[in-house]
Image (cartoon, rainbow, N blue to C red):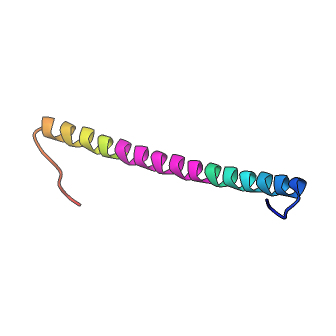
């Protein structure tokens, strides 16, 4: 048995759960940010592919960096 009284133990558990929930929300937010960045990068690549295909269809390809 713990020497910590039950009400105090319950408060400590509630605080631990609240902290765990905050961490989970923060991690989920970071994951969403990473997914948005990945989506933005994919969209940028697709735009470049469309541009390249358009140039090739016109008979040239601009390869300047």
Percent of width and height locating residue 34? 47, 51
| Residue in the foreground of this view, choosing between 28 and 10 | 10
Percent of width and height locating residue 61? 14, 47
Percent of width and height locating residue 55? 18, 41
- Residue at x 74%, y 52% (from the top left corner): 18
Q: Which residues are magenta?
A: 26-43
Quadrant of res 60: top left
Identity of the residue furthest to the front in this view: 1
- Residue at x 21%, y 43% (from the top left corner): 52
| Residue in the foreground of this view, choosing between 10 and 36 | 10
| Residue in the foreground of this view, choosing between 42 and 3 | 3
Name the quadrant of the N terminus. bottom right
- Residue 29, above or below 2: above
- Please give the count of numbered marks on the rendered protein: 0
Left or right, residue 50 beside residue 26: left
Identity of the residue furthest to the bottom in this view: 3
Percent of width and height locating residue 22? 69, 53
Residue 38 in magenta stretch: yes
- Residue at x 87%, y 54% (from the top left corner): 6
- Residue at x 23%, y 61% (from the top left corner): 65
Magenta stretch secondary structure, dominant: helix
Residue 27 in magenta stretch: yes
Left or right, residue 10 beside residue 50: right
Left or right, residue 14 beside residue 27: right
């Amino acid at each position: 048995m713990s020497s910590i009284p039950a009400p105090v133990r319950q408060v400590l558990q509630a605080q631990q759960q609240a902290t765990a929930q905050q961490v989970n929300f923060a991690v989920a937010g970071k994951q969403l940010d990473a997914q948005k960045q990945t989506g933005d990068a994919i969209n940028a690549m697709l735009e470049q592919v469309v541009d390249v295909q358009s140039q090739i269809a016109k008979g040239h390809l601009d390869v300047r960096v």
